[in-house]
Image (tube, rainbow, N blue to C red):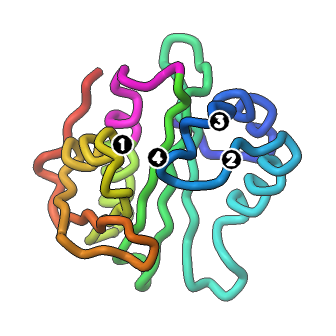
Amino acid sequence: MTPLSAADADEMVSVLAARELYTYIGGEPPSREELRARYERQAAGGPADGSQEWHNWIVRRAEDSVAVGTVQATVVDGGRVADVAWVVGAPFQGQGYAVEAAAGMVAWLRDHGVAEVRAHIHPEHAASARVAERIGLVATGEVDDEGERVWRTVGVERMETNR
């Protein structure tokens, strides 16, 4: 994983181009310009009021540094709680990248004092639910305002990687 920068938009626009990536999260593939603007905002680290910290990484394949996806964490509650998300480009799915990257992100968050990790996952998104389970998150039965299930953990003992 490498910290996200606006320059990553050039490579990531093709990784995020498949329409099926947006089935459960909504939206559509971004243009290079839209992605560059989004990455500029995200790389700023959070809103000016300091209410959140944003941590975003590009997930790269170890053997050749090719970008395969992203992971992100929004840290709130004075650094104690993080909402996390991941996306892996369609050609790279099913190879363990999401689990490995998400587990690495959670470990990094724990090392930086985060006590609780949460993910919001569409109830029909089985692949993301499997990633959540593999990194130690548990479905709570709670549903957010967008109809997504809330997954959370206060321990990391079940985190694992495929690789």
What is the span of residues highlighted in magenta in the rendered image?
Answer: 91-101
Q: Amino acid at mark 1?
A: Gly
User: Circle 2 sits in a helix, a strand or a loop, which is it?
Assistant: loop
- From the image, which quarter does the C terminus lie in? top left
Which sits earlier in the primary sequence, circle 3 or circle 4?
3
Q: Is residue 23 visible?
A: yes
Instruction: Name the residue rendered at 37%, 76% in the picture.
Output: 144
Asked if residue 111 shows in the view, the reply is no
* Left or right: 81 as drawn, with respect to 130: right
At label 2, which amino acid type do we have?
Answer: Glu
Q: Is residue 145 above or below residue 89?
A: below
Q: Which residue is mark 3?
A: 16
Marks 1 and 3, the one that precedes in the sequence: 3
- Residue placed under numbered mark 2 in the picture: 28
Q: Give the side of residue 146 with respect to residue 125, left or right.
A: right
Earlier in the chain: of badge 4 and badge 2, it is: 2
Mark 4–mark 1 distance (CA, rounded to whole Å): 12 Å
CA–CA distance in space, label 2 to label 3:
9 Å
Reply above or below: 71 against 114. above
Q: Residue 126 falls in which quadrant of the image?
A: top left
Q: Give the residue pinned by disc 1.
A: 104
Q: Amino acid at mark 4?
A: Trp
Q: Nearer the viewer, residue 75 or 119?
A: 119
